[in-house]
Each structure stands twice: as C-alpha cells, then as structure tokens.
Amino acid sequence: MRILALDCTAGPASCAITDDSRLLASFYCHVKQTHSVTLLPMVKAALENTGLSVGDLDALAVTAGPGSFTGVRIGLAALKGLAAPYSLPCVGLSTLAVMAEAFLDTDCVVCAVMDARRNQVYNALFRIENGLAHRLCDDRAISCEALAGEIAHMRRPVELIVTGDGTDVFFPYVKELKNIRKAGESRRYQSAACCALLAEKAVKEGRTVTAESLLPVYLRLPQAERDLQAKKES
C-alpha cells in the first residue's frame, strides 16, 4: 500500500511516501518561506526520487488540524488537487495524533501541544504502551493553566513527554513537576512520515473519504473572526 502524506499545519512543512509501512521518501523543511512555496516542490521531489507518479499511489493523507489556519488550508488544498484527478481515497488526521505516533517506541504519556496564542494551546493526551497509542482526551483548545492543573493531578506511572511547537510556551507551567520532560528537537514537530504510517491503519480500517468531502478541523474561529465577533458584541 503506497501512501503520500502531507503536513504543513505549523512552522515546518513535510511530505513522505510509505509502502506497506516502509518509508520510501521523506522531505522536511523548516524555514521562513511560506508553505505554498515549499510544499509542492517537496512532493515533486519525493515522487521523482521514488520513480512514482500520483496515479501509482493507493491513498493520500494529510494533517487536517488543529494548527495554523493558513497552513491547514494549504495542506488540504494541495492534497485535494493531487487526489481528485485520480479519485484517490483520502485520509484527514489529527495533527496531535500524528505527533504521538513519533513516540511509539517509548512507554510514556505524550502531551501534544500546539501554540494557540494568548496562553492557550491545542492539546491532546495519549498513553503509549507496547507500541500503541491510546487517546486519553479529545483534541481541544485549553489554557496552559488548566492543562497544567490537569497534569498535576494525573497518575503518571510512566514518563510524560511534552511535544509540539507549543512546548516552550507550555513547559514553564509544569517544569516543577516530577517525571516530565520536553521532547528532543528531532521529534518535537509533527511529520508527514508519521502521518503516512498512521494513515495506513485508517485505510485498512476503511476510514477514508473522497477529496471533495475532506474537511479541515478547526478547534476555534480564526483570529479575524474572533475580533469581528468581539466588536459586534461590544
């Protein structure tokens, strides 16, 4: 099963191709250029270097949110444009679940956090045990204080690892707690490689959609809409 996956929900952008859980190609870019500039050239390079065309793929996958509103839209638009001409099945995955996939080799609790501004993070918690990730809560937007309080009262028989681009924002709230650490830089950000591997499970379980029906996942309104709503209420 050949899967092409895309991610550009935060600062980095990446694409990857897997074949039956074997990583064939992985391209990652974390620079100040916009994802609309970097993403499709990486896709082209991945296909050329593997000798594949889009028509050779079995499915396409993308991190559908939460994340940057612009980044999420770019990723979905690119995926739809690739999938539609070939009527390829698509998988939209939680960015936070994709983050947890990077820690399947460690029994731990993964606290995935993405910076949502104003001392808030997009968050989900996952228990990793025997190479499997078990979700402990739904994806959510939550204040750093509330999440820290929840973790402080959590029974933690294993290490808790904070990961994601919200790590440096959130970690000061829990740094005094025991058995908690930041993820290393090499695994701190979501990647298309993990997205592709997680998507294989979804495809095997029949959890795919058409390109037309693939939708983004926003946990709250964009800032511009929130500002407009606040003006109307005032």
Image (spheres, rainbow, N blue to C red):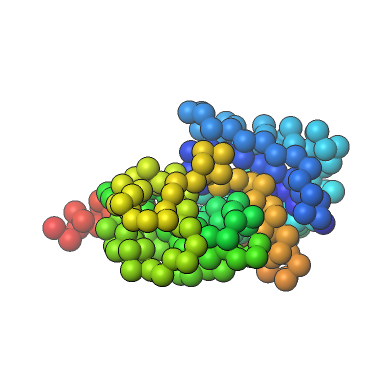
Is 141 left or right of 227, judged from the image as shown?
A: right
> Residue 82 location, x and y as percent?
70, 47
Is residue 68 in view from this perspective? no
State which quadrant residue 200 falls in: bottom right
Q: In percent of the image, x 70 and y 55: which residue is there?
A: 197
> Residue 28 location, x and y as percent?
62, 36
Please state which of residues 173 and 205 is positioned toward the viewer in this rendering.
173
Specify the farthest residue to the top: 32
Is 29 left or right of 161, judged from the image as shown?
A: right
State which quadrant residue 207 falls in: bottom right
Is 42 left or right of 110, judged from the image as shown?
A: right
> Residue 218 location, x and y as percent?
44, 58
Please state which of residues 198 and 186 is positioned toward the viewer in this rendering.
186
Image quarter in which the C terminus is found? bottom left
Is 32 left or right of 115, judged from the image as shown?
A: right
Is residue 53 in view from this perspective? yes
Please state which of residues 145 and 183 is positioned toward the viewer in this rendering.
183
Q: In percent of the image, x 48 and y 70: which residue is there?
A: 136
Specify the farthest residue to the left: 234
Image quarter in which the N terminus is found? bottom right
Please state which of residues 102 and 180 is positioned toward the viewer in this rendering.
180
Q: In percent of the image, x 54 and y 32: which residue is there?
A: 30
> Residue 90 location, x and y as percent?
68, 59
Q: In percent of the image, x 51 and y 41: which residue is there?
A: 184
- Above or below — where is 144 with respect to 32? below
Q: How many marks?
A: 0
